[in-house]
Amino acid sequence: MITSIKQDHPMPAARNGGSRFHVVINDADQSFCFDGPEANAWVAHLQMQHLLRTQGIKLRELGITASSHQAVLAHLARALPGYSHLGGWAAARSVWDRARTPS
């Protein structure tokens, strides 16, 4: 069941005691971003769909359960060699938007 989507609605806590992180991957630009449990993954997902519809940017998203931001970053660096970390969703969206905006 999906409850109402609110800007301040955080991701649910993981069952094993770790925190849930929302990861977004842009294979075309070889970059990724992630937000922690304090972020609203639903809003990011809807904004990703908007980028796909308006600019054709194809993004992958997934959830990772980890003990810390550093653990997620280390895991993604191993899993995605050569990809750059852009920070959180807001920073990455800004970079990806600018890359597609005509001069």
Image (cartoon, rainbow, N blue to C red):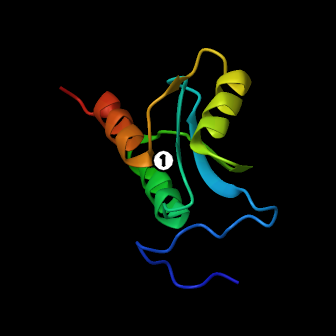
Image quadrant in which the N terminus is located: bottom right
Q: Is residue 10 left or right of residue 14?
A: left
Residue 78 location, quadrant: top right
Nearest the viewer among 87 and 74 is 74
Q: Residue at x 48, y 39 (%)?
A: 57
Q: Residue at x 49, y 78 (%)?
A: 5
| x and y, in percent, of residue 85 in the image | 50, 29
**Residue, disc 1:** 52
Q: Is residue 81 left or right of residue 29?
A: right
| x and y, in percent, of residue 46 in the image | 48, 62
Q: Residue at x 28, y 33 (%)?
A: 98
Q: Residue at x 82, y 61 (%)?
A: 16
Nearest the viewer among 22 and 73 is 73
* Residue farthest to the top, as pictured: 82
Nearest the viewer among 80 and 16 is 16
Amino acid type, callout 1: Leu
- Indicate whether 4 appears above or below 7: below
Check disc 1: other Cα within 10 Å, few if <14, some if 14-19, many if 20+. Answer: few
- Indicate whether 33 appears above or below 1: above
The secondary element bearing badge 1 is classed as helix
| x and y, in percent, of residue 90 in the image | 37, 47
